[in-house]
Image (cartoon, rainbow, N blue to C red):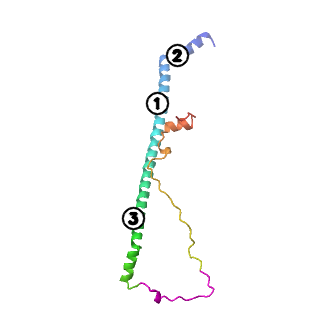
Amino acid sequence: MTHATRSLRQAYRELPWRQQLRRLAWALAAIVIVTSVVLLEVHFSTQNIVLGSEWQRTRRRILATQNENLVLESRLAELTSRQVLLSQAKEQGYRPVSPEHVHYVPVPAEAMPAPAVPNIPEAKLSPRTDDTLPEAYTISLIKWLMYDFFLVPEP
């Protein structure tokens, strides 16, 4: 290549409209990248909001069901109380048994039958009382990318 050809090619590469076009292309690429990141952030934030509200609705339903169970348990305790059972027994014609009316029948060498239902202790579950969202629902996408992918230490 001759010197004239080189200088002509260099002049062509450095034309003002080519430089402007190159800058415009870089600016558009940056805008597309920033817009993509913002749209991803909005998308994941929206998903987090939807999941968080669904989680809160489920939590409210659980609490309402627990309250309903407590009301039913107290109603059952009320219905099976001694006074209520005695009044129902009197209404149906039952009377208390006196010792002279009780007859025991001895059964020789008879083993006690095994209980129909084994005695298994009930597990005590304590309901959670906090209505805060888990940490996974509160962090933004940008922070998540920084901490997990770019290995930036968390503050």
Q: Nearer the viewer, mark 1 or mark 2?
A: 1
Q: Is residue 119 magenta?
A: no
- The span shown in magenta is 96-112
Q: Quadrant of residue 87?
A: bottom left
Q: Quadrant of residue 45?
A: top left
Residue occupying image coordinates x 62% and y 88%: 108
User: Could you tell me how far apart the alpha carbons at marks 1 and 2 are, in whole angstroms?
Assistant: 24 Å
Classify mark 3: residues with Cα within 10 Å, few (<14), some (14-19) or many (20+).
Answer: few
Above-or-below relation of 43 to 10:
below
Label 2 crowd bin: few (<14), some (14–19), many (20+), radius 10 Å: few
Between 3 and 62, the one lying in front of the other is 62
Q: Earlier in the sequence, mark 1 or mark 2?
A: 2
- In percent of width and height, residue 58 lies at 44, 55
Residue pictured at 48% horizontal, 45% vertical: 137
- Helix, strand or loop at label 3? It is helix
Q: Say the numbered circle drawn on residue 14.
A: 2
Residue at point 55%, 66% (across, down): 121
Name the mark nearer the viewer: 3 or 1: 3
* Secondary structure character of the magenta stretch overall: loop
Identity of the amino acid at label 2? Answer: Glu
Judged left or right of residue 37, residue 5 is right
**Residue marked by disc 3:** 71
Query: Which amino acid type is shown beneath numbered disc 3?
Result: Val
